[in-house]
Amino acid sequence: MATEDTYALCRCGRSAAKPLCDGTHREIGFREAGPGAEPRPAGDGGTTEKGRKA
């Protein structure tokens, strides 16, 4: 009987196996923004499009 493999794409951006998930999101406390999620304020320490600190 054939089985299907399951793959997950990285959404936290920190996986060493990009574009696949390696579980790093658990270590860094990543939480996916979804319906009802609080928006992150501007200047929260994230990076800009060019990779510079905001």
Image: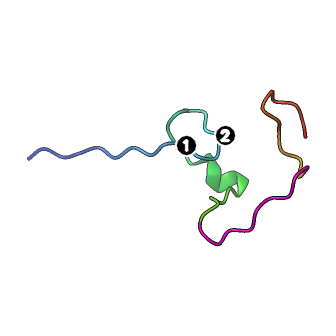
Q: Is 29 situated left or right of 18 in this image?
A: right
Residue 27: mark: none
Q: Residue furthest top?
A: 50
Mark 2 burial class by Cα count in 10 Å: few <14, some 14-19, many 20+: some
Element at badge 2?
Answer: loop
Q: Position of residue 26 (x, y in %)?
A: 63, 56
Mark 1 burial class by Cα count in 10 Å: few <14, some 14-19, many 20+: some
At x 63%, y 51%, the residue is: 25
Q: Is 34 situated left or right of 20 in this image?
A: right
Relative to residue 6, is residue 36 depicted above or below? below
Along the line of sight, the residue nearer the viewer: 1 or 35 = 35
Q: Report how far apart the C-alphas of labels 1 and 2 lie in the structure.
A: 8 Å
Report the amino acid beneath label 1.
Answer: Cys
Residue 41 forms part of the magenta stretch: yes
Element at badge 1?
Answer: loop
Total marks placed: 2
Residue designated by label 2:
14
Report the amino acid beneath label 2.
Answer: Arg
Relative to residue 40, is residue 43 depicted above or below? above
Q: Are marks 1 and 2 in contact (CB under 8 Å)?
A: yes
| Prevailing secondary structure class for the magenta stretch in the rendered image | loop
At x 29%, y 43%, the residue is: 5
Residue 39: name its quadrant: bottom right
Write the start and end of the magenta stretch as one range: 35-43
Q: Position of residue 37 (x, y in %)?
A: 68, 68
